[in-house]
Amino acid sequence: MNEKLNLMKEFTKGIVSENPIFVMLLGMCPALAVTATLETSLGMGLLVIFVLTLSNVLISSVRKFIPENVTIPAFIVVIATFVTIVRMLTQAYAPALFDALGIYIPLIVVNCIILGRATAFASKNKVLPSLIDGLGMAIGFTLAISLIGILREIFGTGAIAYGVYLPLGIQGSILNIDSPLFNIAILTGPAGGFLILAVLLAFFNSRKIKKAEKLKAERKRLAKEKRAAKAKEVTA
Amino acid sequence: MSATVFVTAILSSMLINNIILTRFLGVCPFLGVSNRIEKAMGMSVAVIFVMVIASAVTYLLYYYVLAPLEISYISTIAFILIIASLVQLVEMVIKKVSKKLYKGLGIYLPLITTNCAILGVVELNINAGFNAEYGMWNGFFVAVTTAFGAGLGFALILFAFSSIRERLEHAPVPESWKGIPVSLVVAAIMALAFIGLGGIA
């Protein structure tokens, strides 16, 4: 029971408390580069889920055989191998996504999240926790870049297209808003990536600050009550 | 083969296709080491250095080894290994040649292996097909020049950005926007300015 709880924690920490994009600020390059639309973000997220989970599993299962002074090169080779596999699979089954992501597919190799999880977690833990950790982190990454992608696509084009990059079999778009507020062309360009990420980070920061203030106020109130109680005791 | 090809290669990779602002490569060091000008400059010099050498080596490796043997599908693995070992080698050479330079660049070199700007520029150079366009050796020089221009573009942006960030520290920024968010807004404005440069091409 306790073990199950721990695994659950490993899984959710990647999504919320240690979210790679919004909390740890890792993997910024793909978060900015491929998030012009929801579909490219989701596509990138799926590739990262595949690579991160498998590389975590493989690295943690061979962690005792890797000599200590070549750990980083060994990890990089493992990650690069999985990236090569997803690159070929994408080219074969989702050519539109392959063209849209372009050089950012091979660049998954140098995505700091993957090497980071390999050194910080997979090289020290058993296979099952590593699998859960990798999956959680990758899903957290996917959700984060999808959020950026949704905002950029809605405010940039006023609609969310589907079936363009992912091989869904159907094509179209939902939520067609015809308003100048939802037609900000710069948001689909490079500047939009920086801007949307800045707004999101500031939003999460402000929530964190509010939470901390609340906690502080709560603690102050408790301390005051305690002091009052003590004073009462003394007078009594 | 005229000099204009090289000038165009430098200008376009430095300004029009700036690796940070239009391609989002090397954003991690861009945000990480840009809080002080000296740090930013140290990183930029190290990046230019490794980027030029890595482009030269990978170009030759790709067209003399991987392409003839038809194993270009392992290019990603080969390139990242080349970059990793190159960084080690450069670190050793610098340590031996100049203690002073090593003190300045030493801490940035290990970070460069996982800097996506290097692998990104290498991949872009191979994808651009300079080999077919200019011939084997002319293509080699164009690739190296492009890498140098990309490195210069990285240095230029990092310098401008770190200068702005040093001043930003004293600006009255709202609490929740302090640090990375306001830096990203600055980057967004700079990226807007660089869209204008695209018109020159």
Image (tube, grey):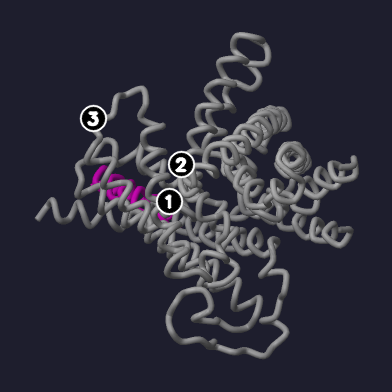
> Which mark is on residue A94?
none
Query: At 75% from the left edge and 36% from the top edge, which residue is drawn?
Result: B141
* Residue that label 3 marks: A65
Magenta segment's dominant SS is helix
Q: Chain of mark 2?
A: B
Quarter of the view holding residue B10:
top right
Between discs 3 and 1, the one toward the N terminus: 3
Q: Residue furthest left?
A: A1
Please state the horizontal and vertical placement of residue A44, each as a whole percent of the image. 47, 62
The tag on residue B77 is 2
Q: Name the outermost residue toward the front.
A: B68
CB under 8 Å between callouts 2 and 1?
Answer: yes
Which of the chains bears the disc numbered 1?
A
> Can you tell which quarter of the image residue A193 is in?
bottom right
Residue lying at 62% horizontally and 42% vertically, measured from the top left: B122
CA neighbours of label 1 inside 10 A, class few (<14), some (14 to 19), many (20+): many
Vertical relation: B158 (above or below) B88: below
Query: What element does badge 1 sit on?
Result: helix
Q: Could you tell me which residue is drawn at 57 percent across and 33 percent down?
A: B112
Callout 1 amino acid: Thr
**In the picture provided, is A123 more to the left or to the right than A98?**
left
Per the image, the residue denoted by label 1 is A84
Measure how far apart labels 3 and 1 are at the Cα level: 23 Å
Q: CA distance from mark 2 to mark 3?
A: 21 Å
* Range of residues picked out in magenta: A214-236
Q: Amino acid at mark 2?
A: Ile
Q: Report the amino acid beneath label 3.
A: Phe
Quadrant for the N terminus of chain B, please: top right
